[in-house]
Image: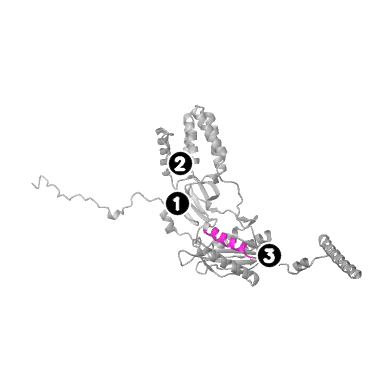
Amino acid sequence: MENLTAAKSRQTNLFLATCILGSIGVLIGGIPSETAVAAASTKQPSAISVLLIPYQSIMNGNDYTTGQRITQLVRSELVQHPGITVTDSSLNFPDSSSVSPSPTITRLEERIQELENNLRILPAIQLRKRQIGAYREQPRSLHSTEPYLLAQHHLARALFWSGQDTKAQKILQLVAPMGPELNLPRQNFSAFYRHSFQKVVERAIKQSPATVQIRRATPHATIRLDGQLIPPAPVQLSGIIPGEHLFQLQLAETVIWAKFIPLKSGPNPEITLIVDQNILGEPIDQLIQSISTNTLSASAIQQAVAAGTKAHAEYVVVGGTAKSPHPARLNVHSFVIHVPNQKIARLAIRNFDVDMLSGQLDALRIVQDIHQSIENFVGSRRIIDRLDSRLPNSPPKLNYQDVRRFRPIPRETTPRSKVPVRRRPIRAPAKSSHEK
């Protein structure tokens, strides 16, 4: 009996010692546990890294914000897909600084008004010049030309007050082409000043008008001339008052580029309004330009591959949106580029509805196409001649018949042939004295 009890106690002690040694081995890593071995045997494969470049509009089929919304929907579904990691794909511009008006300009305006109220005109003139210089250094902050023009007019008024009429007239000649129809408030500008400015505007209008041709511009960006929206490029503008004008490029609500450009009478050199866009420092301007013209050239695919390499991505997803026969829907074209071999695969065309709840379902279908293409990548092409077969693959040429409607309308619109002509009645000649 004692031998049986001793044997059981030895077995119990051996079992406890085995458990303690196993626990110590797991802690120090010398003896792996059964759970560790099972976890190692069922290790998941590494996720595939994908760079999603925002969808672009083909041949200006839709605005910039529509492509951004489609990209957000596809990205939200792609992030939730198992086995795929999405890298940051936000577009950046070379000048990413804030475009809001500087607080220095506001402080200067308050100080200038204080000096003018105390009749200290000369110090007010110096501060006003600093304020105008700040506007010219940050033209992207001018969502409207009115603050800049009013600052120039206040400077000209102060110069008139100080007896510097010649300098004041030069400023009026500078701002007349940019804002000939600016309504100057009567409580701030006298009748003499408003009459002087009107005379300058009349002389500027009598000059020979300027003509400028905008050949290219950043795709999907709206062009503004002196704050006014003009047709998309390529376009030829005529009937412009010679002088300095403000050209701006705007994407959604952000002004991405702005510059004061002087225009002379007659034809002017062509203007190209291109702002380089990049992803993680890699430029993709050729890729965006290529998609907007309904193609994917070799140089465009190389830029996409360079961006994917910089993002450490194995695949790059690019695409474009085009108008659909259905007015409320868009045809979304998606492509997957394999970064190592620089080859591209075309996915199925999806009919997308952005404004309806079915847009999320359409985005899910695109993500399923992307995942299936990555699992069975068979891309063999290196260029795509035409994204949408219904659209041309060359930019539209200048149509001078359409451009004419943007010229100033002449005052006399009635054809001369329809103007009634007053004819005097024919009278018989008077008889001479001999005939009588």
Seen at 54% across and 41% down, the residue is 135
Residue at mark 2: 176
Q: CA distance from mark 2 to mark 3?
A: 62 Å
Question: Is residue 146 placed above or below 5 in the rendered structure?
Answer: above
- The front one of 65 and 258 is 65
Q: Is 188 situated left or right of 321 in this image?
A: left
Mark earlier in primary sequence (2, 3) = 3
- The front one of 369 and 19 is 19
Q: Is 154 situated left or right of 32 in this image?
A: left
Residue at mark 3: 47
Q: Give the residue type at disc 3.
A: Ala
Residue at mark 1: 238
**Where's residue 261, x and y in %?**
52, 46
Mark 2 or mark 3, which is nearer to you? 3
Q: Main secondary structure of the magenta part?
A: helix
| Range drawn in magenta | 66-82
